Image (cartoon, grey):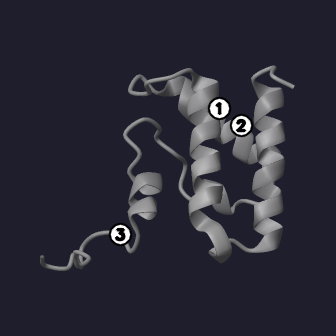
Amino acid sequence: MAEKTRDDDGPDRWSQGVTEGSDALDLEEGVFTWDDPARIARSLKKSAEASDRRKSSPYRSAMSMLTFYINRAGKDLDADQREVLERAKDELRTAFGRD
């Protein structure tokens, strides 16, 4: 069985491809690198509510994308940014009235 190799034109990781090319949400560039949890939550909420391609509720789509990013970044995610993104989850819950 032949070993799979990465396409030179493709993303470095499949998770990067999902984040950048999500069919469900059109994300603002760099949203997961921002240092303001409330801004991240607002952007995700706006993207989820504007999407007509998502398969679940706006809240679930936004939270799923945020959680996916945190989980896939794994050990490569710096501790400070991980904390910002975890706080963005709380902001997202608040934004959707789920706190």
Task: Name the residue carrying label 3.
Answer: 11
Q: Amino acid at mark 2?
A: Arg
**What residue did someone put label 1 on?**
45
Q: In the rendered image, which quarter contains the N terminus?
A: bottom left
Farthest-out residue, left: 1
The answer to which of marks 1 and 3 sits earlier in the sequence is: 3
Residue placed farthest to the right in the image? 99
**Where residue 29 sits in the image (x, y, percent)?**
53, 56
Give, as a three-letter code, the residue at label 3.
Pro
Q: Position of residue 97 (x, y in %)?
A: 81, 20
Residue in the foreground of this view, choosing between 97 and 72: 72
Task: Classify residue 39 as left or right of residue 99.
Answer: left
Quadrant location, the C terminus = top right
Residue at point 82%, 38% (across, down): 91
Residue 20 sits above or below residue 4 on the image: above
Q: CA distance from mark 2 to mark 3?
A: 27 Å
The answer to whether 87 appears left or right of 59 in the picture is right
Q: Which mark is residue 17?
A: none
Query: How busy is the neighbourhood of tag 3: few (under 14 within 10 Å), some, or many (20 plus)?
Result: few
For label 2, the residue is 42
Describe residue 68's horizontal placement relative to residue 89 as left or right: left
Q: Quadrant of residue 16?
A: bottom left
For the residues labelled 2 and 3, say whether their Cβ atoms are less than 8 Å apart: no
Q: Residue type at mark 1? A: Lys
